[in-house]
Image (cartoon, rainbow, N blue to C red):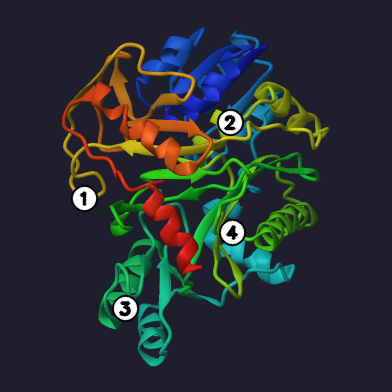
Amino acid sequence: MNILLIGSGGREDAIARKINEKDTLYSVLLNENPSIIRMSHKYMFYERNNDEKIVEFAKKNNIDIAFIGPDDILNTGLNDTLLNNHIPTASPSRSAARIETSKEYMRYIMNKYNIAGNVPNFIFTDADEAKSFIKENNKEYAIKPIGLTGGKGVMVMGTQLKDKKDAMEYAEYIIKKDGKVLLEEKQNGEEFSLQAFTDGKTVVYAPIAQDYKRLYENDLGPNTGGMGSITDKDFSLPFIRTDQKKKAMKILSDIVNALREEGNPFSGVIYGQFMVNENSLKVIEINSRFADPEGINILTLLKTNIVDIFLDIYSKTLKNDIKFDSMATTLKYIVPFGYGINPVETELLIENNIETDSLKLYYASVSGTMNRVKTTHSRSLALIGIAKSIYEASDIVEQSIHKISGNYYMRHDIGSREMVERKIKNL
């Protein structure tokens, strides 16, 4: 079959490889990703506000089904345009994707349908009112733009914002920029991601993953798009209880049902980011696509043909028989120096035959060849180890990084035995 993939980051490289196992890949690229280009029968470059060019490309190449990877493109209405031109897709409509692209809409859905895991939240359009609210309350808040931020726009009091003055200034900045700001009561605990496939009714869950957004080791520094992620062989994590996992699954299912009731049925990949502690499970955000990097972990483990899943999503016949390898994974992103602050573009050299059965390398925001890539301001390469334990998978990555040379930065602590044991102890 002819499959159209829109997007060209590390997550899309992982999707492309699954498509390429049995079917013919056509791609719409945002950057000259050498891995996706190598696999693509034909490709074109994405032009914002020129959806008709993509429709023409799809029709010319007899595309059987399309899949959109990035959140910002899901927010353009391209998916709706493809469907209106009789090109099947396995991605959500722009309206359904608002569960991610509008944090206000996500909280509205949770409030209206009384979905568990909600947190006290407040929306302000007046900067003085927001500042007074922060000043007069003793609680700490996460201060969030309403729309997409690429994982970098949320600031939390006591973390990125050291005091109320910082919080008030940031809330005022967001209102001036976007017209409104969302304040949510700060939550403490361990975050995890639960991803799922859905056709709008049936929801099939992937292994739980954990993402590491902070730039520096020991979870310090500014937020990024994600420096790495882990999964475990039992499809949960050693610091997540079974009852907490079941609650998260129920919440995702309830959100899918609520969107259908709203007249915005969701078809595609959905995932929740949750915060868990000893006493509660809270929803931090809901997203309308594979996570990055956590999606790469589960795609690496996916055994079921991904095109069959896409077709079942489109035809509303999704079956609860999607299979994953029972292995642990640890992913670590290579990024340019200064990433998230003042990134410096450079070149990286990659040795031949770096991949093995237990190590995979995915190409993200780079251009060039498979052995010599030029970085951009975003994440460059994702190395993922596959083993029987999280820390063994971490060791596999560490033992292989010498095969990539150049000036880059990577967090080494992700998936280490010390990190995993500390998380278990903390909870």
**Looking at the image, is mark 3 or mark 2 nearer the viewer?**
2
Which of disc 4 and disc 3 is earlier in sequence? 3
The kind of secondary structure element at disc 1 is: loop
Rendered residue at 58%/31% (across/down): 301
Foreground mark, 1 or 2, reads 2
Within 10 angstroms of label 3, few (less than 14), some, or many (20 or more) residues? many
Tag of residue 168: 3
Q: Estimate the spatial distance between the alpha carbons at disc 4 and disc 2, rounded to whole Å.
A: 20 Å
Q: Label 1 is placed on what type of residue?
A: Ile
Amino acid at circle 4 = Ile
| Structural distance between the alpha carbons of marks 3 and 2 | 44 Å
Q: How many angstroms separate mark 4 from mark 1 (CA)?
A: 32 Å
**What residue is disc 1 on?**
341
Q: Position of residue 38 (x, y in %)?
A: 43, 10
Residue lying at 36% horizontally and 12% vertically, measured from the top left? 353
Task: Judge the density around disc 1: few (<14), some (14-19), many (≥20) Cα neighbours within 10 Å.
Answer: few
Report the residue marked by disc 4: 240
Of the two numbered discs 3 and 4 in the rendering, the one whose residue sits closer to the viewer: 4
Give whichever of discs 4 and 2 has the lower sequence position: 4
